[in-house]
Amino acid sequence: MQPDFWIQQDNPTGSWVLSTLIASLPLVVLLGLLITGKANAWQAAWAGLITAFAVATTVFEMPLDLAARATAVGAVFSLFRIIWLITGAVFLYDIAVRTGQFEVMKASIAGLSGDRRIQAVLVAFAFGAFIEGAAGFGAPVAISAAFLVGLGFKPMQAAILCLVANTAPVAWGGLGTPIRTLGAVTSLDVEALSAVSGRILPPVSFIVPIWLVTMMCGFRNAMAIGPALVVIGGVFSVVQWFWSNHVGFELVDIVSSLSSLAAAVILLKFWKPEQEWHFPDEPPPTIVAEAIPLRSVARAWAPFGILTVLVMIWGIPDVKKALSEFGDFRQEMPGLHKAVAKSEALTGRAVPDPKKDLEDAFLDIVPASSTGTATMIAAVISGLFLGLSPVELVRMFFGTLDRLRPAMAAILGMLCLGYVTKYAGMDAVLGLAMTRTGANFYPVFAALLGWLGVALTGSDTASNVLFGNLQVITAEKLGLSPLLMASANTTGGVMGKMIDAQSIVVAAAATGEHGQEGAILRAVLGHSLALAMIVGAIVWLYAHVIPWAVQI
């Protein structure tokens, strides 16, 4: 009797090297066009999608109707989960600029410190981590990058800084969604996974603020604000370790970021850098922060305050569930849900288990529970609060949509590409290539496998779904700790967040750098790989030198 599902092939050519090379073609086309500047983002995305569709339906022998349905699932996901969110975030930023409130916000930040180095760390790292913990997806990069541009940072620089900063917090993004998902797919204890991840990432969390400032102005200038970097990064990393190991996994990012911001505010009341650093071509400030009444500062920050409250409310599981039941339409994708089985290499079973090994596929039409809706409502409330009429808001909204058309096309193509490669099993082939190593080196490759998963899918959660179980199977075969290798997947994965095509397009859209996606990718690629290798080195130490340090 023929099974009523299609089984993915993990080596369709009979040569794992050739299969890996062919599976990488969509990624090579997408990134190659971006890096070389031969095409803009949406053209590169659609070229990659066409390549993925062709490879999936020929070499991997994926039925044409399954590939088409996978494309449709990706399109719906991109619309409600990403495009809607980006539109709301940019719309909110446009409102703040139109009403003049961003000028006041800039002055209030200058009241804490006019030093651009400190501003970058506060906004890109600490504030971005808060948004990551509350919402995840593209919200941290979109909001913090737009914020930095409003503060006077160059758009390209703002995009790059926020992409690099949005790394260490991602494992607990969206109220712990990646860790929660990793526990579900591996059947490992979620609190134990959080605890081990909370021993891998804190050193990186301490490094990232130093890394950001060094990128901006060199190591010597970074060390000139050493006390601020030590306090901001140090408090964040210590709280990240403590909360993930001794309290819970849902609020790690939120508590860590708020603690870091509070510590920075206290420090800056008693300490200032000897010389305030500004961009070489920056004009002198025209607003004196101390002269602005507190009421005006509160009014200017109101849009982001409203945004923060609504995003947190939308992130509460019970609220999200109620909103979903009220206004969402989540349906199994006919002809795709439970119609694709993972290969033996991923499951460890020669015959797929219909209860465990079949891929889910849902059409997520989620206008109510989407974080984008919270962002959009925050924008509308803020506009009305700041004195804009409904007619002005509608006009501004369509203006925002018009500006974002290229970014929307790019995100749509990239998400569809990701879903085709996922259901075709092409992502798994790339990941399996990294598992062909011995126990001595696999801990490093375990982190790089997670990095690859996020680079391919744009999501640490998706990478955990894709490779989490594979990490456990490989660890057991090599005599390594399944808990450590699974944690390596999610912690290494976060370093791939800055180079996934989705994040790059979001950063470009939020900063108005349409057409510069290739330049942004070239700027962050080396940083992404270097930080992923640092995570791999930490995992290797835990696996082979101090295994007692991650025993739960």
Image: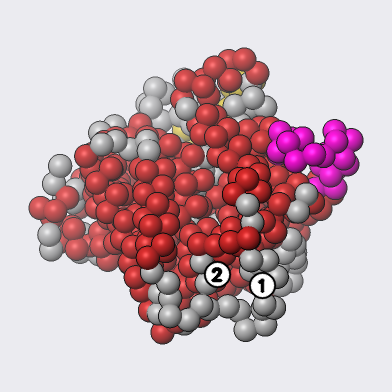
Q: Quadrant of the C terminus?
A: top left
> Which residue type does callout 2 highlight?
Gly
Q: Is residue 156 above or below residue 83?
A: below
Taking depth in this image into account, of 410 and 236 the one nearest to the observer is 236
> Disc number at residue 21?
none
Q: Which residue is pictured at 51% across the width and 52% down the height? A: 128
Q: What SS does tag 2 mark? A: loop
Q: Which residue is pictured at 58% across the width and 61% down the height? A: 290
Residue 376: which quarter of the image?
top right
The stretch drawn in magenta includes residue 394? yes
Spatial separation of the CA atoms under disc 2 and disc 1: 9 Å
Residue named by callout 1 = 285
Q: Position of residue 319 (x, y in %)?
A: 51, 22
Residue named by callout 2 = 114
Q: Is residue 276 above or below residue 539?
A: below
Q: Which residue is pictured at 63% across the width and 60% down the height? A: 291
Q: Position of residue 349 (x, y in %)?
A: 32, 35
The stretch drawn in magenta includes residue 324? no
- Residues shaded magenta: 379-400
Q: How many residues crowd around disc 1 within 10 Å: few (fewer than 14), some, or many (20 or more)?
A: few
Residue 352: which quarter of the image?
top left
Report whether 358 appears left or right of 81: left
